[in-house]
Image (cartoon, rainbow, N blue to C red):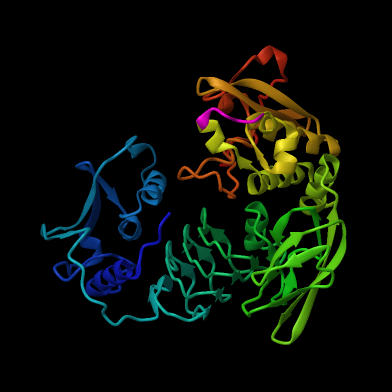
Amino acid sequence: MRAVRKKWMACLLALILAFGSVSGSIGYTAVSRAAESQRYVIYLDGKEFEVSAQDYMTIYYLRNDKTALTEYLRMVLGERMPDSFQSIGGKILTTDSIEGELFPAESGEDARPEFLISDKKLLAYNGTAQVVTVPDTVTEIHSMAFHGNSYVKAVILPESVTKINRYAFYDCPALTYIVFPKSVSSLGKNIIMECKKLTNIVAPEGSKAYTYAVDNDIPVTTGLGIRFRNKKCYLLEGDSEKNPLLNCLGKAVWKSSKKKVATISASGKISAKKTGKTVITATVDGTVYTCQVIVWKKTMDRRVSQIIKSSVTKDMSRYEKIKAVHNWFVRNVKYDYYRYQLGRVPAVSHTAKGALLKKLAVCDGYSYAFQMVMSKLKIPCRFVVGRSGGVGHGWNMVKLGGKWYHIDVTFDDPIVNDSNENTTPYYTYFLKSSSVMKKDHKWKKSKYPKCNSKKYNFIK
């Protein structure tokens, strides 16, 4: 998704300021009536839908990003949402029939406040600070409040904040971490999205934000001290990956004690060379932080062990272990998309070796490899042979809590914008019942366990 750039932000802000401070409404100079006399409507291919003032503002933000706009409209309109649309427009209607358009002519770069706050709600942050401390008069963070801000690296929320709405931190390219107070009791869906440099969040253990981090596979710390994400990093020969410093805004100087074992780049990427152990140091503002890197021989068994060592902890539940392994495959294995398009997929891409050692596979390679890791964890797992979209397809079933569920790791690692570089885990086919899977998967049901439990169907 592309960011909405500064001139769009300025235009929106000008509209808000022209309208006044009425609870986050959007408007412009020709519209100056009281909030209670207004209706906010949008038009999808000419069909009218009434929305709230806040949703109207968010729709304005997203109007040039069809993908994000469509997703947001689905949440706002629910069953009213048409299957598709080609055009969008909107108006602010008053009781006196004075109308304002959703897309008025843009104004210049007017002076604007750093924090746009109305009724204790932070509607937008427009400043250029790298570390932002939200005023303690704020109790709620509005949807898209930090959207597209390229300056912010850290956000500190005060104890006064109790609610954070969906997409509050959307497309913040420099955002590194967020500090959440225990007071936050309401978190919308996808409060953090498209923040590529986010390393972690800070939250009290047991808090709503801490649970959000765990559920969304975001590293979380309970304090602001700098530390490596992993004290030990396990790699196979030829692997490259980062072990980021959490809570760190300063520039690190990296060093490896044994460069023949592993090197580290100026950006912090570790490259494993040969079997052995080395210590990686990161020096930040005169303080040295260390982690140990263990490099193993490149074999199938070692890869399975490496996945478990890197992703699974002893205190995890079976559910958490399955999710962690599912996410490792999404982040580390690419679908052999381009050769699939050419009809030239090599035999190795259909095997566990393709997924585990080459990190390039198609559906059966993903599924065989996933089954191998489940076997090592002593979690019952089946390989399912079937069809999807009219072609042959393979996926898995796992047993959890005495019941069987479908998992399609391949489909949860989708081709995004015609690229096989996706590393964002999807959960569309994670622990689903047969009632969900049968919509686009076909298999011979008599050959496999029944997957009737709908316990995890809500996970998207």
User: Residue 85 versus residue 7: which sits nearer the camera?
Assistant: 7
Instruction: Tell me where residue 232 sits by quadrant.
Output: bottom right
At x 66% / y 54%, what residue is drawn? 217
The image quarter containing residue 182 is: bottom right
Q: Quadrant of residue 300?
A: top right
**Where does residue 428 sit, x and y in percent of width and height?**
56, 38
Q: Residue furthest right?
A: 276
Question: Which quadrant of the rendered structure holds the N terminus?
Answer: bottom left
Q: Is residue 432 visible?
A: no
- Relative to 322, 249 lies left or right: left
In depth, the one of 326 and 368 nearer the eye is 368
Image quarter hosting the C terminus: top right
Measured as percent of width and height from the top left, residue 251 is found at 64, 79
**In this picture, residue 38 sits left or right of residue 22:** left
Q: Which residue appears farthest toward the bottom when viewing the image? A: 286
Task: Inspect the magenta stretch and tell me whether residue 83 lies in it.
Answer: no
Q: Is residue 345 magenta?
A: yes
Residue 42 visible at all: yes
Residue sitting at 66 percent across and 44 percent down? 333
In the rendered view, tell whether residue 97 sits above or below residue 340.
Answer: below
The mark total stands at 0
**As displayed, is residue 208 above or below residue 319?**
below
Residue drawn 76% across and 45% down? 321
| Camera-nearest residue between 4 and 13 | 4
x then y, percent, for residue 154: 56, 75
Q: Main secondary structure of the magenta part?
A: loop
Give x and y (percent) for residue 120: 43, 74
Residues in magenta, as a range: 342-346
**Is 92 or 109 nearer to us in this picture?**
109
